[in-house]
Amino acid sequence: MGRKGHSKAPVPTWAGDGDAPLAQLPGVTATLAEKLGKLGLQRVQDLWFHLPLRYEDRTRVSAIRGLQPGVPAQVEARVEAVERSFRFRPMLQVAVGDDSGASLVLRFFHFTSAQVAQFTVGRRIRAYGTPREGRAGLEIAHPKYQFLADADEAVLSDRLDPVYPTVEGVSAPALRRLIGLALQRLPAADELELLPPATLSGRGLPDLRDALLSVHRPQAGADTGLLAQGLHPAQRRLALEELLAYQLSLRRKRMAIRRLGAAPLAGGDAVLARLRTQLGFALTGAQERVLAEIEADMARPEPMLRLLQGDVGAGKTAVAALAAVRAVAAGRQVALMAPTELLAEQHLATFRRWLQPLGLRVAWLAGKLAARERRQALAAIADGGAQVVVGTHALMQEGVAFADLGLAIVDEQHRFGVHQRLALRDKGLSGERVPHQLVMTATPIPRTLAMTAYADLDVSVIDELPPGRTPVQTVAASVERRGELIERIRVACADGRQAYWVCTLIDEESGTSGGEQAGYGRGAPVPSPAQAATSLYEQLVGDLPGLRVGFVHGRMKSADKQATMRAFKDGQLDVLVATTVIEVGVDVPRASLMLIENAERLGLAQLHQLRGRVGRGAAVSTCVLIYQPPLSALARARIDTLRQTTDGFAIAQKDLELRGPGELLGTRQTGLAQFRVADLLRDAPLLPLVQHIAADLLARDPERAQRLIARWVGGAERYAGA
Ligand code: ADP
Ligand code: MG
């Protein structure tokens, strides 16, 4: 492929006919091409990678006597009786029997008279479907069938039949035919192959051509169990290549950023020492370790790209503050962006408390600033008067220009998309230099997932909580026990404790229902969160005379919200009724009772976040998950997990198992939900190999790496822009 490095010529992505538009296939009209195009099927190779969802095994015939309910099978039999009825709705039942001496009912609800006429007693039929237990023995509803002439030899397919994900407006047989045509255009194995040969040999993995052919049309006798689980060598090979392409694409982006360079930020030990005394606590070993990792990165002339993971309450803010002061001491500005105004305001208060006594200037920028304040903030940001700027998304808006941004910190990364993270970084672009980036998240991401989702970031983990915390006790209670729970609050508050009662029907920050992630039950009318929370608030005020009950929700004015939160924090309120506005980052150490309403509707990560609001002081804290029975199996699994563990990583792993990686990360976040073959949970064991090959390819054959990216990530990467 000519010389290495940057070449001006467009990179050839694909050997053979893969790049040809689908319209070149016989029978693909403009209308059909448009339908396919809407689903991302544009080139011939797109059909190569449109893989079957499952298979139908019609390579053999089973005896009716041996059929198992629920196990798909093909039978050959003779029609024994035909019955057409109209009792509740039209129905056709055809009894068929075979040489095994057993019979089976084929049942149809949709049929034409012409169809009925074909079923004559004694006729030979071959039928395929999944038998179920019916009223009079086994039956198959709507089997696939064909009639056989008496003389017909039983010619059977020697391949499993693929069942493809449907493409709207294209019939299944038409799609199968098209894919067959596309596969005929597969180039020779060595032209198609992009993986280094050493990768496959010795691992029992086929080359790409073989893999595609055996995934589309597995041979009779192929291990259908493995195929169904996606663990067949052909599927694993495809998953390996897809994961590799994503890994390469993320690593390349990261290399591109690294090349831009950054200002090394070091020095200022004296002021850091003063901040440490200012904090009022000693850092934990884990905090010290991650801080050292961060400082080592910041001292280098290339931008830090680091994800700081730490469970709820692990103390990420203090680490961020120390990093910020390091940057300021080196003469640069720091931006700290949080996803909600409430959380940003809390950071502002914390940073002012810690940094102002050191003589540092901390500015504030959020959406709701008055015009004059906003002008002043912008001016201070632009002339460098503001050394640390805390704010919300407003930090990324146009018109915000930093004098010299050296460090961009993004808190609660999971609430932002990748693009927003990059936008903040771009605020600091000056010439060829970019700011160092630290992104923090309390949503623990299992290591395997992090390796893929954040291959463009280094990861530091605070895996230890500050001392003196007692694990939160978690219990579940049906709503029917609300009275008891209210009594429990009365007792706790009489004892000087404080309680949260959270109504969580809707995630107000993003405007989507929390249930969207959690699998909302359908059908039940869902009251608006404000209504639900308001009526709960009124009930508590009535039932808890003598206690001070406050109420915060997302639609309140920011100042009112702040005032209420502050009153709760200062102990002027005993009970705080809240919607999910309190979800992230809010810190009130004296609160030790957390009640979560409609817990069955929330995802594990969100429940864990909410629970993390308590257990921050020395008192034993309790979290009550209030649910509306009956619990679905999934909701029960979530609640059981929370009762069993408070370890965020264990919870994240469970969440991954229950929901899958796309849900866990959110589709906004990455293209992970759009993997065509790979499944991060299932294919996690491939990841070390993927990383190894990625590093090797980038070093030794960047052009091949580029072709792999183009094959699998293609357009998606172009749009993401690095
Ligand atoms: P998170 O990691 O969830 O953002 P925070 O930074 O809000 O956690 O810290 C939670 C609480 O723990 C805060 O009140 C903070 O001041 C306190 N904290 C942080 N580090 C320590 C420590 N090493 N020792 C004692 N308390 C700490
Ligand atoms: Mg935090």
Image (cartoon, rainbow, N blue to C red):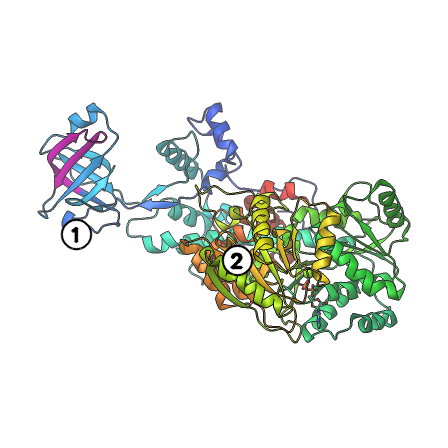
Q: Nearer the viewer, residue 630 or 510?
A: 630
Res. 223 image quadrant: bottom left
Q: How far apart, in angstroms, are the residues tagged by discs 2 and 1?
A: 44 Å
Task: Name the residue at 74% across, 66% down.
Answer: 319
Horizontal side of 108 relative to 381 (left or right) equals: left
Residue 579: image tag: none
The residue carrying mark 2 is 604
Residue 66: image tag: 1
Task: Name the residue at 45% across, 41% down.
Answer: 50
State the image coordinates of residue 275 (x, y, percent, origin top left): 82, 69
Mark 2, residues whose alpha carbon is within 10 Å: few (<14), some, or many (≥20)? many
Ligand 1 shows up in the quarter that is bottom right
User: Which stretch did the figure color magenta?
Assistant: 76-97
Horizontal side of 708 relative to 211 (left or right) equals: right
State the image coordinates of residue 254 (x, y, percent, origin top left): 68, 54
Horizontal side of 219 relative to 720 (left or right) equals: left
The type of residue carrying mark 2 is Leu
Helix, strand or loop for disc 1 = helix
Say whether disc 2 or disc 1 marks the residue closer to the N-terminus.
Answer: 1
Q: Main secondary structure of the magenta part?
A: strand
| Residue 150 visible, this orientation | no
The type of residue carrying mark 1 is Gly
How many numbered discs, if any?
2
| Residue 565 visible, this orientation | yes
Q: Which of 315 and 592 is in front in this view?
A: 592
Of labels 2 and 1, the one closer to you: 2
